[in-house]
Structure formats: C-alpha cells, structure tokens
Image (spheres, helix red, strand yellow):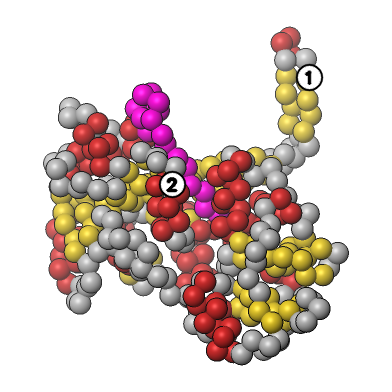
Amino acid sequence: MKYNLEEIKNLTIDVSATLIAAMKQMDENDCKSLIVTKEAAYFALISIGDIQRQILSKGNLNYAVKDVLRTNITVGTIEDSPEAIREMMEERRIEVLPILDAEKKLVDVIFWRDRYDSRQKKKKNIDNIPVVIMAGGKGTRLKPITDVIPKPLVPLGGKPIVETIIDSFCEEGCTNFYLSVNYKADFIKFHFDSVENKEYNVHYFKEDSPMGTAGSLRLLKDIIKTTFFVSNCDILIDQDYHNILKYHRDNKNELTAVAAIKEYNIPYGTMELSENGLLTNLTEKPNLTYYVNAGVYILEPHLIAEIPEEEGLYHITHLMESILARNGKVGVFPVSEGAWFDIGNWKEYDKSLLNFKQRFG
C-alpha cells in the first residue's frame, strides 16, 4: 500500500506547530509519531519521545515542533526489500517509516500497524522490578457497582482493571506484584486464584484500616529492597515503563511521578490586576496547561523507612513533600492526556472506556 501526503494528512504536522498541538494530534489519531512537513513537503519525523525529552530538558511546552527535531531519523529507501524494512522497524521499534527516493523525496510511508501487527510487541526491557498496586480502596465514586465488586475488579478492556494493569507491566518483564488490599480483599484473591496459566506472582499485604496511598508501603519494609513501581488500581497509562525507569535512574531520582499533560481552554478573556484594582494585562481566551498526577510512580526502597509508623492516612504526596523538605530529588515524567486512562469516577470511566477501545481494539 502506498500513501501520499494528502491521504495521511491527519498524521502530518507543520514544522511551525506547537508541541501541545502535536501531542493532541497524536492522541486523536492513536499514534506516537507524526510526519513533519515544511512548505507542504516532507521534512522530518517527530515522536512522543522527542516531546517528552524536550519537556524534561526545558521544563515546559512553550516550543515548536522545529525545536525538537532530531537529525538522525531512520528512513527507508525504495531499494530496501520488504524483509529489510520489517527487520529495521522491528529492531528499532519504529511506528512510522518514511520511504525516500534517490533524491530524498518522500515516495511512501509505512505504518507498522497497517503493514504488520496492529501493535508492536514490546521488548522485555525491565529486569523484573517489583510493582506495588494500591488495591484497598472502597471506590465510593464508582457506586453502585463497587457495592458488589471492589474497584480493582471493575472491567476495562474485557478484564478487570487491575489485571489489565498487571498485563501492561508483564509485557515489559515484570513478574512480581504486591497488592495492597482491604475492601473486599477476598474477591480480589479469588479472582487471581482463578486466573489460569498466569506468568506472574501476586503477593498480598492487608491494611487493617485505610492508610493512604503511601501509608501501606511501610508494611513492605524489609520485603522490597530494590527500586520499585507503585500504581493506583484505577488508572492505566499507554507508555513504555522502560522509558520512565531510564529517566528515573539517569537523573538519580528518589521518587519519580508520572504526570499527564492536560490543557484547559478558558472561553473568556481573563484579566490580571495590581494594587487598587488596576488592570495590568488582558488575555483573550487563554489555554492553560497543567501536569496532573497520573497515579504511577517509581520509588527507591529507602523511602519505605521514611514513612511514619503512626496510624492515620499518609499519601504519596506527603512523601513527596517530605523528600523535597530535605532537598531530595523528585522527578516528573510527562505523558499525553490521551495516554492516561482513569476509571476513578463514572465520568472518567466512560471516557476512558471509549479511548481504550479506540487504542486497543
């Protein structure tokens, strides 16, 4: 199958477009790369990884596509055989491969999902890092279904959300999972006891009373002794965990939090005032961008010992504040809004279910 730029218009973006526009376009078209054009002709490629690296390096999204383009983009040629192209895309995990002629002009574009499998099979890049899943909440915002089953067993993609989360980590090599349980814990244990031929181990630790999103981690003291993931049981992210782990280790963070980039449009002109109510600035219908806590983290094991022993709720945000107070390092890894699936309440659940079906079929 051959394409031209008009046929793949939804997957092309001008070199002058903003990074937030590129992320939105990737979300809308369920892709992680876009073809960059300049004066309507092929110019380069941009990936979600390029955007993430720019955010991590510069700290904001106030840049254009042209500011993040790589010079070493992999391309194919009209002389490459189908076998060579597939091997190149599989080895380098390429989603979109431009095919150029001898004059470096674009003659075709190959999309992995069209030509081969619907999704690339992830390589097992994580060395069996433990994963803790917070599965003890009552899920009051999802009543009445959580009166019958616990929130971790609410379905997403034909499976309970907690099993879908586990599968996503298993794809990258994780096999040891620790579930913090409390409400309807027997339901959760019964479910995993019933899963046949599972290639992972599930360990349980029980809160006698709610301890918060980090409080129950102290029950794992002397059990987990390596870097580990923590995930809420009502979210899923479409992101290679290997990349988050690499960022965490490269920067020697003690804790890394994943954040979804959300943009809010204010449909009114806004005003900024100084003393005595004097107008200093007018902005017409501004767009505001925020980094929203996505509920996935990487922690170093020494942090478990820093969680207070006293009873009461202790959330992971309290742990972050404690680390910052002693000048420790807390990193933030950005993902696009469309890569974050939240089922914490009915409104978000309905939206996530639709997005999940579009992305994963």
| Labels in figure, total | 2
Q: Position of residue 300 (x, y in %)?
A: 30, 42
User: Is residue 323 in the magenta section?
Assistant: yes
Rendered image quadrant of residue 1: bottom right
User: Is residue 124 in the magenta section?
Assistant: no
Looking at the image, which is closer to me, 228 or 216? 228
Looking at the image, which is closer to me, 253 or 118? 253
Which residue has dot 2 on it? 250
Tell me the magenta residue range: 320-337
Q: CA distance from mark 1 to mark 2?
A: 45 Å
- First in residue order: circle 1 vs circle 2: 2
- Which residue appears at 44% of the width and 42% of the height? 251
Is residue 25 shown to the viewer in this render?
no
Give the number of the disc on residue 67.
Answer: none
Q: Is residue 201 above or below residue 313?
A: below
Is residue 323 shown to the viewer in this render?
yes
Taking 194 as reference, is 94 left or right? Answer: right
Q: Is residue 189 above or below residue 285?
A: below
- Which residue appears at 40% of the width and 70% of the height? 123
Q: Secondary structure at mark 2?
A: helix
Q: Position of residue 185 (x, y in %)?
A: 17, 54
Q: Position of residue 194 (x, y in %)?
A: 17, 72
Q: Is residue 168 above or below residue 302?
A: below
Three-letter code for the amino acid on which mark 1 is drawn? Leu
Q: Position of residue 358 (x, y in %)?
A: 53, 70
